[in-house]
Image (cartoon, coloured by chain):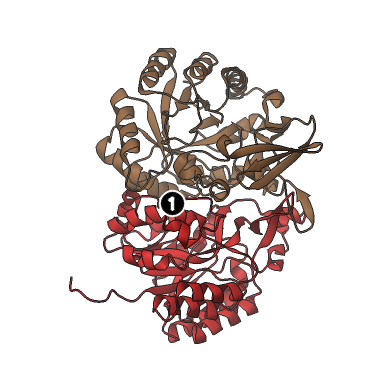
Chain colours: A red, B brown
Amino acid sequence: MSAGTPPPAKLTLGPLLFNWPAEARRDFYFRIADEAPFDSVCLGEVVCSKRAPLFERFLPAVTDRLARAGKEVVRSTLALVMSPQEMAEQRAIATDGGGLVEANDLGCAALLHGRPHAIGPFVNVYNEGTLGVLAARGAVRVSLPFELSGETLRTLAAAAGATELEVQVFGRVPLAVSARCYHARLHDLPKSACRFVCDRDADGLTVETLDGAPFLAMNGTQTLSYTLGRLTGELAELSALGIRRFRLSPHRIDMAAVATAYRDLLDGRAEAAEAEARLDRLAPFAPAANGFWHGAEGARRIAAAQNAE
Amino acid sequence: MSEGRLELVCPAGTPAALRSAVDAGADAVYLGLRDETNARNFPGLNFTPDELRGALQYARPRGCRVFVAINTFPAAGRPGPWHRAVDLAAELGVDAVILADIGLLDYAARRHPALRRHLSVQASASNPEAIRFYHDAFGIRRVVLPRVLTLSEIAALNAAVPVETEVFAFGGMCVMAEGRCALSSYATGKSPNTCGVCSPASHVRYEPRGDTLVVRLGEFTIDAFGAGVPAGYPTLCKGRFRAGGRAGHLFEEPTSLNVAGLLPELAAAGVRALKIEGRQRGRAYVARVVAAFRRAVDAAARGEAVEAADLSGLSEGGRATSGAYREAWR
């Protein structure tokens, strides 16, 4: 390989995890298409299959606008697939012959066997053995699970070969998925008649401990961190490992400005401290955390200075 | 074993519990080695290689099979302990290994093709496409189904997959999809998927505050009890929290799964085996639960009405649920 500058780092907008009104979702993606420096945008419902039809009518227009803006459109699939209908929807996405599909369930990965596809962060890729098997079956891009430490990422990056690795660097961290809907349960509704009450919480509903400390965020069948997972100063180290694709997870904030902050950081136009200050202003609803990167409690924020000890 | 009878797969956290399970009528026992390679990596539990040899010598002549769970996800760059566990299981000729990690399944299938492979619940294979993937790629013969499926989903699934299915019948119940939960990791830094412990005792503290005993996991309060109120082991997802102006068990009550009342339906759905959870439990518990399920399974196989096995005293919080098998649970 010739010496020189590495390929430019790329930014992916992850799939929207929350249940926003369809029009708000459409307008969000239109703005992303027109103004945000993302290289790739993941579309698709990954949390609850009941929500998927709500956005269906806007999907072609959003896909088209993103593609015309030069963004790669990736179709992300459901993380927990149980019913025949969910399987049919997954199969339709996997076999429609369009752009890159990101499988969040092994069943979907099986449908994509032998042709280039992506593996999403809801698939358990903890080690180089698993990474190698998935790559041999056609995975060209793997967005890694959220709880991996920097040390684990180092090992995986060294083993990745031609498979492109991606790490989420911004957004509440998905921690669990269930067949049960906690939003419906909280409102004394059966999941089958949930009235889509999860749409009341655009970034998830804060779950506090009994003594009032914010802890988690409820999002229908999904549970996320209360904190915003955020890596900034760590990006230089990730880049040095050869990880050059970073995922930002959508929140109901100015995601175009968030993407610009990351683009400036990656392109050397901003220092980490400046990027952090901008992100603090853009996402004031929860504090940042980076504990998983350090192999510690995911809820913790560990300063770079401690990192150097 | 008679045709059509549900197979009873029972937990063995120690050699003593293993003998209790075998004596009480287990068709198979499952156990782990004493390290991070299995999902019940608790102090004082599990088997040394010599104890595994002893387990085979005790169980086999009594008609009981031995499965070895190697069902955590190997650490990046350090697959040695997991590979050695699979090698040891193959060398000793255990009846099956229970695996979750794709890389480890690949290793076992290539190195020890004759070693029977079961897919652990930790792999979260919740649909026929996913199960067929593990069958086609790694030759798994049985899948332990996630505790997220309803009876009708299980029946449809059994009609569509080329492998046996095993379902959880009794004991602690994950409310989250297994193998896909980092809640404990978020609070403690110890990943259940890689360390084999959820809500580890090393991170649990009890703090008296006035008349209340507060239960902390890492930095977070996960429950609180009045003086003298019996409290089960504090598991994060079964703790009490506040959201939307309400406080309580937002995720799940501290209940135990008990499917004793559903055995005919499970058999009719094509399920092959029942799994009793509880490798962390003592021998007396194991003996009582296994004996009760032995009677229930045999009665169901004879077409007799199954008495709802009286196991309430053994359930978490004294309460039992049929869990996700009934749609209303969701």
> Can you give x and y, in whole percent of width and height, for residue A45 in the image?
55, 66
Q: Label 1 amino acid?
A: Asn
Image quadrant holding the C terminus of chain A, namely: bottom left
Camera-side residue of A101 and B252: B252
Image quadrant holding the N terminus of chain A, namely: bottom left
Residue located at (55% from left, 71% from top): A250
Camera-side residue of B167 and B286: B286
- Please state if B170 lies on the left or on the right of B36 as rendered: right
Element type where label 1 sits in the image: loop
- Please state if B12 lies on the left or on the right of B232 as rendered: left
Residue located at (49% from left, 78% from top): A261
> Can you give x and y, in whole percent of width and height, for residue B177 in the image?
55, 47
Read off the residue under disc 1.
Answer: A124
Camera-side residue of B201 and B76: B201
**Callout 1: chain:** A
- Please state if B300 lies on the left or on the right of B210 as rendered: left
Camera-side residue of B1 and A184: A184
Residue B246 in the image: above or below residue B254: below
> Can you give x and y, in whole percent of width and height, for residue B168 in the image?
56, 35
Res. A55 in view: yes
For label 1, the crowd category at 10 Å Cα-Cα, with few meaning under 14, some 14 to 19 and many 20 or more, is many
Residue B323 in the image: above or below residue B31: below
- Please state if A94 lies on the left or on the right of B308 as rendered: left
Residue extending farthest to the left is: A2
Quadrant position of residue B319:
top right
Res. B252 in view: no
